[in-house]
Amino acid sequence: MITLGEYIIKNQAEYPSASGELSSLLSSIRRAAKVVNREINRAGLVTDIIGGSAGSENIQGEAQQKLDVFANDVFKAALEARGEVCGIASEEEDYFVGFADERQSNAKYIVLMDPLDGSSNIDVNVSVGTIFSIYRRVSQPGEPVSMEDFLQPGVNQVAAGYVVYGSSTMLVYTTGNGVHGFTYDSTLGSFCLSHENIRIPEMGNIYSINEGNYIRFPEGVKQYLKFCQEKDDASNRPYTSRYIGSLVSDFHRNMLKGGIYIYPSGTNSPNGKLRLLYECNPLAFMAEQAGGKATDGFRRIMEIKPTELHQRTPYFIGSSKMVDKACALMTEFSAE
Ligand SMILES: O=P(O)(O)OC[C@H]1O[C@](O)(COP(=O)(O)O)[C@@H](O)[C@@H]1O
Ligand SMILES: [Mg+2]
Ligand SMILES: [Mg+2]
């Protein structure tokens, strides 16, 4: 059994020019994930850090859960502690945070994160996650971190990943060399390699979408749902509907089994709900590394040039042939 720490070091050896900073950064995330995992396993109890609302709102006007704030603090502290990261941006921080200490200000990486994904599921014992995205800074070491460092297109990512806190806890990541999953073994206190080189099946029979918003969906999405629900034995339809309401968990299942997750625009939300920089780009990088696709219905997500830290985008991600079909219908019915 190889642990995540060992795997990171083994892979670093394959890059003689590697400085070890990215490996050390991934180790910081691994450690923070263990701390957050411990508290999530106690979700349902009410303490200072878990159980219910934190009584505050983030810049997007969403009520923050105590665990949103706790996870944000734990990951931020872990990333600031070591010296590879010069700044972070987070769903729970209004603005980006530049680390001022001299060691950090010379560091070469920035991290964007969704510390706790699926917040509405925390207190009802349904799986939730953490999502992270890593870039090299564009400002010079020693210079103050700027918005430019964070508003990079997804194609510039050097690594991305998520932690899913479910029936088991897994950390899944890519550094552009395939997607690898590690399951947390609490008896060892380590993440152990369980899913090396994950590949998304080109075709699946699962679709994930909140059909409660149906009347506000674009016509292309309505047509795709009709396609998913029509009977056709030859193409294994009707598909099955599965929606957990935690993006990480819905994506993880679809990545392993094949499927498509859609959070479209709506008549009341022209850009949908999900955030480009710390939800959509990191999972898009992983989907593509695993042979899948991610678009906004028309464009490749990772080619979108960001303009705002918390900007939203419609989202279609998963099995390549399913995303192609959905996007074909979006184009066909977009003129309607
Ligand atoms: O309740 P809705 O509108 O279906 O939205 C669910 C989606 O919103 C999210 O909860 C947004 O993420 P956060 O919980 O990090 O804000 C996704 O995880 C999930 O897929
Ligand atoms: Mg989220
Ligand atoms: Mg969140």
Image (tube, grey):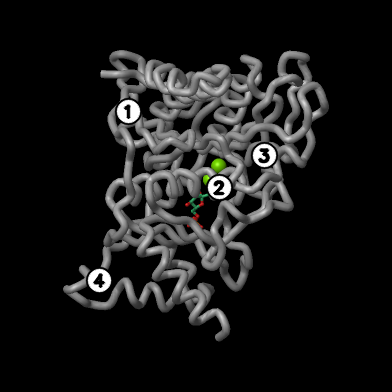
Quadrant housing the N terminus: top left
Quadrant of the rendered image containing residue 167: top left
Crowd around label 3: few <14 · some 14–19 · many ≥20 (10 Å) = few
Q: Earlier in the sequence, mark 2 or mark 1?
A: 1
As drawn, is 203 to the left or to the right of 18? Answer: left
Measured in 3D between alpha carbons, the distance from the residue under mark 4 to the one under mark 3, in whole angstroms, is: 43 Å
Q: Residue at x 57, y 28 (%)?
A: 70
**What residue would you read off at disc 4?**
238
Q: Are marks 4 and 1 in contact (CB under 8 Å)?
A: no
Q: Are marks 3 and 1 in contact (CB under 8 Å)?
A: no
Q: Are marks 3 and 2 in contact (CB under 8 Å)?
A: no
Query: What label does residue 216 carry, if any?
Result: none
**What residue would you read off at disc 1?**
183
Crowd around label 1: few <14 · some 14–19 · many ≥20 (10 Å) = many
Residue type at mark 2 is Asn
Q: Earlier in the sequence, mark 2 or mark 4?
A: 4
Q: Nearer the viewer, mark 3 or mark 1?
A: 1
Q: Residue at x 43, y 52 (%)?
A: 245
Q: Nearer the viewer, mark 2 or mark 4?
A: 2
Q: Secondary structure at mark 3?
A: strand
Q: Secondary structure at mark 4?
A: loop
Front residue of 92/234: it is 234
Residue type at mark 4 is Pro
Measured in 3D between alpha carbons, the distance from the residue under mark 3 to the one under mark 1, in whole angstroms, is: 33 Å
Q: Residue furthest right?
A: 143
As drawn, is 104 to the left or to the right of 26? Answer: right
Q: Residue at x 21, y 76 (%)?
A: 232
Q: Are marks 2 and 4 in contact (CB under 8 Å)?
A: no
Residue type at mark 3 is Ser
**What residue would you read off at disc 2?**
281
Measured in 3D between alpha carbons, the distance from the residue under mark 2 to the one under mark 1, in whole angstroms, is: 23 Å
**What residue would you read off at disc 3?**
56
